[in-house]
Image (spheres, grey):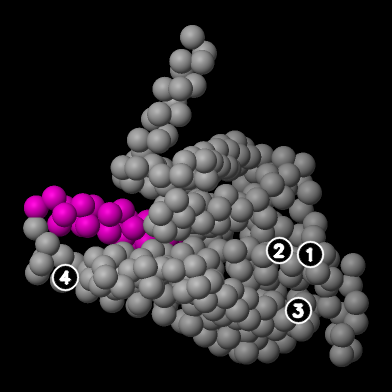
Amino acid sequence: MQERQGGNISHIEFLFIGFHELKENRWVLFFPFFLMFLLSTAANSLLIFVIKTQRSLHSPMCVLIGLMALVDLSLPVFFVPKMLLTFLFNWNGISLLGCLVQMFIVHFVGSFQSSILLWMALDRYAAICIPLRYNDYMSPSSSAKFVIAAVLRNGIFILFIVIFAGNLSYCSSNAIDHCFCEHMALVSLACGNTIINNVFGLLTIFCVTTLDFVFIVVSYAKIFISVFKTASGKSSQKAIHTCTTHIIVMFVSYFCAMTAFLAYRIKNSIPPNLRVLISTMYLLFPSCFNPIIYGIRTKEIREQIFKRIKYIKLLNK
């Protein structure tokens, strides 16, 4: 369907054509993405369940890990089922309004991966560098202020991105070379001036992802300096082990995000299928990877998971 905007015909219905080079063999992609979706759902659900049901895991850090698992659980739900149906039944269509709604939800929820990683870094900084003031910094009132600030910041920037995208005229094509409504994939179809969209997209990346990354790096730098100066023996090893877990998750998340960002800025040098794969995995892979890392490397969580597994085995005997 099309409508007229300012004398031009603008599409209001779009088609997802991600991995179009595979043609009729696109259905094969259903299986790996479905398995990753199952892994993400099962692993994050288990992590949330264990943290919620065990009072010993209600420390601020474990709660933050639970919040990260909640984000990782929610994010794939908003685009993977539609993507799987597209692969199997060629249900490629989506309205402009539906596309904008999906874009807002996916980018808004995804932005909290960065915010929670920053919160984790600040938690470790307060616990290791200024332990006497830890309860003040991680009190419910301070945490509420951080949550409100993150929601407002992320929400406002993502909302403006969606509004600017919704005001464009899409008169050149209605075929989105992607599997969900990624911002640049939609904006690249506009036939008008998209400078504002590109500039504000870069501004959002800087004010959300980049600033969070800078604060995270500064926090961990101060943590390691403090640990090497004052701590020793087991306390030093425990602090380094805890921080290393978060750094691994941070590295994977930011590496996937930066790779996806560059894939659309140098798209002429990257095959379309690879670009779509990179952009999709940027959202899906951390959702599978994060709960496994936290479940394995966080001792308290690992012990509770093993207890659950042993209990289930006893019940089945």
Element carrying mark 4: helix
- Residue 4 appears left or right of 146: right
- Residue 24 appears left or right of 288: right
In three-dimensional space, the C-alpha distance between marks 2 and 3, rounded to whole angstroms, equals 12 Å
The image quadrant of residue 177 is bottom right
The residue stretch that appears in magenta: 233-259
Nearer to us in this view, 9 or 134: 134
Nearer to us in this view, 1 or 205: 205
Q: Are marks 1 and 2 in contact (CB under 8 Å)?
A: yes
Label located before the other in sequence (4 or 2): 2
Question: Disc 3 designates what residue?
Answer: 166
Question: Disc 2 designates what residue?
Answer: 102
Q: Is residue 29 visible?
A: yes
Above or below: residue 64 compared with residue 1: above
> Which is closer to the viewer, label 2 or label 3?
2
- Residue 242 appears left or right of 25: left
Element carrying mark 2: helix
In three-dimensional space, the C-alpha distance between marks 1 and 2, rounded to whole angstroms, equals 6 Å
Element carrying mark 3: helix
Label located before the other in sequence (1 or 3): 1
Question: Disc 1 designates what residue?
Answer: 98
Q: Residue at x 74, y 70 (%)?
A: 100
In three-dimensional space, the C-alpha distance between marks 3 and 4, rounded to whole angstroms, equals 48 Å
Q: Amino acid at mark 2?
A: Gln
Q: Residues within 10 Å of mark 2 (few under 14, many from 20)?
A: some
Label located before the other in sequence (4 or 1): 1
Question: Disc 4 designates what residue?
Answer: 226
Nearer to us in this view, 143 or 47: 143
Label located before the other in sequence (2 or 3): 2
